[in-house]
Image (tube, rainbow, N blue to C red):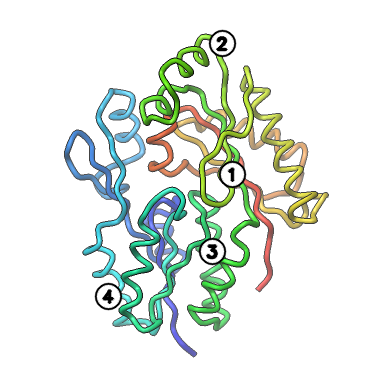
């Protein structure tokens, strides 16, 4: 049986400690802050990131450095027969396409997965990949499965501010100003390639209701699971843990018995939407 290594990046929210616990590998994502290079969790904590973000620092995201990625592949291929690499969604970064091109030099031993996920849904893909690897599946079989099931998941994100979308050029200053004056709270969706507008609300309570109705609809219509028994629910947030805890209780009232995890939202997403956001994800449960 081939030994298959599972590699992802920290956009999945998988820390170095959790990667070791799961028996997988995670590349720390690079960020440039006021021109200085930092690596997520290595020399840039969640707390430091938000301190710099709210302090007005110039922050830009970057895909994993090519040299770092190749070095990691080479290191893993000394111990494993094959590598499955699960980067963030191709619709949100060019890292997936770049990695796919680089993998062509490895005669199929490196399989790059483009299942268009990020944060807690990407984390779930890593978990699924590890279960399949432990069950004896090949790297190609794992890649095919993750890409075939890529739309079996959704993320809905409510924002507390429009400032960072405006700063990133996703909103015109005029629209952002009007939205702020009217206290509009947008709800965004990640389903497949893009971060898209989904709905608008005026209160946090309305945002939560919109997101809960959205995952309920996904369960019934997309996952053929109206009771939610075979749906995995998770919460993500950007420096908004107390609100996330409260939201978890509200979700459990509607769907009791679920093991709902709470994770920080990927810093690469938080960079563009700012602190105070709250997200919920729904993913179809698969058996291997």
In this orientation, which residue lies closer to the viewer: 261 or 58?
58
Residue wearing tag 1 = 155
Whole-Å distance between the Cαs marked 4 and 1? 33 Å
Q: Tell me which numbered mark, 3 or 2, is placed earlier along the sequence.
A: 3
What is the x, y in percent for residue 180? 49, 14
Q: Is residue 251 above or below residue 108?
A: above
Q: Which residue is under mark 4?
A: 75
Q: Residue at x 41, y 51 (%)?
A: 11
Asked whether the residues under the numbered discs 1 and 2 touch, taking CB atoms below 8 Å apart as contact, a structural biologist would say: no
Comparing 262 with 206, the one in front is: 206
Badge 3 or badge 1: first in the primary sequence: 3
Marks 4 and 3, how far apart in space? 21 Å
Q: Which residue is mark 3?
A: 127
Find residue 40 and report its horizontal and vertical position in percent.
31, 47
Question: Given the current orientation, which residue lies at the most extreme left position?
Answer: 36
Q: Residue at x 40, y 60 (%)?
A: 96
**2 or 4: mark nearer the eye:** 2
Circle 2 SS class: loop
């Amino acid at each position: 049986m081939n030994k298959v290594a599972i590699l992802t990046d920290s956009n999945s929210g998988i820390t170095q400690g959790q990667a070791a616990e799961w028996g997988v590998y995670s590349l720390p994502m690079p960020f440039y802050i006021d021109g200085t290079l930092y690596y997520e969790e290595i020399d840039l904590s969640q707390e430091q990131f938000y301190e710099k973000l709210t302090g007005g620092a110039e922050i830009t995201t970057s895909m994993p450095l090519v040299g770092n990625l190749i070095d990691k592949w080479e290191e893993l291929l000394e111990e494993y027969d094959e590598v499955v690499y699960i980067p963030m969604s191709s619709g949100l970064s060019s890292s997936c396409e770049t990695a796919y091109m680089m993998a062509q030099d490895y005669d199929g031993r490196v399989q790059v997965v483009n299942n268009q996920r990020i944060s807690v849904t990407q984390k779930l893909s890593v978990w699924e990949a590890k279960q399949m690897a432990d069950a004896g599946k090949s790297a190609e079989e794992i890649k095919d499965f993750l890409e075939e099931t890529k739309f079996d998941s959704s993320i809905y994100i409510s924002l507390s501010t429009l400032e960072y979308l405006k700063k990133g050029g996703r909103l015109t200053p005029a629209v952002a100003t009007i939205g702020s004056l009217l206290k509009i709270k947008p709800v965004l969706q990640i389903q497949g390639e893009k971060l898209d507008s989904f709905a608008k609300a005026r209160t946090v309570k309305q945002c939560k209701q919109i997101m809960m109705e959205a995952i309920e609809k996904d369960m019934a219509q997309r996952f053929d699971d109206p009771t939610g028994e075979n749906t995995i629910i998770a919460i993500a947030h950007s420096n908004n843990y107390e609100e996330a805890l409260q939201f978890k209780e509200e979700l459990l009232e509607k769907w009791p018995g679920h093991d709902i995890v709470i994770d920080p939202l990927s810093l690469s997403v938080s960079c563009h939407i700012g602190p105070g956001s709250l997200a919920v994800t729904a993913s179809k449960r698969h058996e291997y």
